Image (spheres, rainbow, N blue to C red):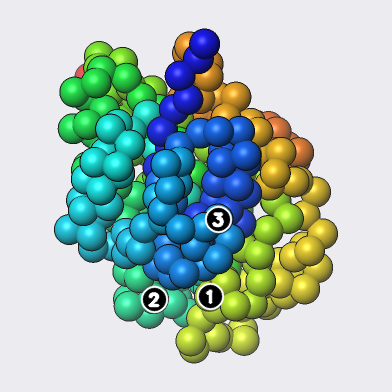
Amino acid sequence: METKKVWFVTGASKGLGFELVKKLLSEGFQVAATSRTVNSLISAFGETSENFLPLSVNITDNNDVKSAIAKTTAHFGQINVVVNNAGYGQIGTLEELSDEEARENYAVNVFGTLNVIRNAMPYLREQKSGNIFNISSIGGFSGNFPGWGIYCSTKFAVAGFTEALAEEAKDFGIHATVIYPGYFRTDFLAKDSVKTPANPIQAYEAARSSEQAHLDEINGNQPNDPVKAADVLIQLSKEQNPPVHFLLGVGTMEFLTNKVDAITGDARKWEVLANSTAI
């Protein structure tokens, strides 16, 4: 009989993280779930139990994360699957967003994820097994979204260090996968979730148009189901050789094709000049 794995899921109070924790518990997995508002986890899933450990965690605080990982291993005896899901969307052109706004997005989406990886890896290395799923975004594969540059760059960072992590961790039997979700019907684009620029510049018409399209048209009409995404992550955790890159959801392959075609086209067009550096 298969032993149920222990999952550590950040950003579990809503969206994909919430649906994943709900699904995992319904299937008998043991789950440590984190949120800045632990009461929301307790209200949804109950108090601490044999299978559930709700944790109040600020992932931008390395000591807070270290303590959460230690509590998880003390409660369950191990960690098998880490899901770095915590993060938020930041709208705004590069000119519009202040240094503070940009750094805040990086603190959560990038350095918060690194804090979890840094503190989980010693346990995974010791047991010589495990999965790490880093939730990026299709915007972490294609940055062609005016007004989303900082957010996309945080998700590009997640994709980049996951590639390196996959190489660093494989000798210890640990698999790292970057997940690129497309549009899922969660509250990610809700006005109380996504952040907009404190000082918008109206001259950026394309950015304002993209912002309004996401907040008013795409929000609530996304083509993908987060419950089914949870099923996919559970299935990936059971694979002997899971992929390093995983595009999740209807519509993501179009972004892949468009970017590959664009890069290939530019490379071929400018190949002679690019190779003119040869000694």
Residue 34 as seen in the image, left or right of residue 171: right
Q: Looking at the image, is mark 2 or mark 3 nearer the viewer?
A: 3
* Looking at the image, residue 233 lies above or below residue 93: above
In percent of width and height, residue 209 lies at 72, 73
Q: Residues within 10 Å of mark 3 (few under 14, many from 20)?
A: some
Query: Which secondary structure lies at badge 1?
Result: loop
Q: Disc 3 or disc 1, which is closer to the eye?
A: 3
Q: CA distance from mark 2 to mark 1?
A: 9 Å
Give whichever of discs 2 and 1 has the lower sequence position: 2
Check if mark 2's residue and mark 1's residue have beta carbons within 8 Å. Answer: yes
Q: Quick check: marks 2 and 3 in contact, CB under 8 Å?
A: no
Q: Which residue is mark 2?
A: 101
Residue 5 in view in this figure? yes
Residue at the disc numbered 1 = 195
Q: Residue at x 62, y 39 (%)?
A: 26
Q: Is residue 16 above or below residue 151?
A: above
| Rendering quarter of residue 166 | top left
- Label count reads 3
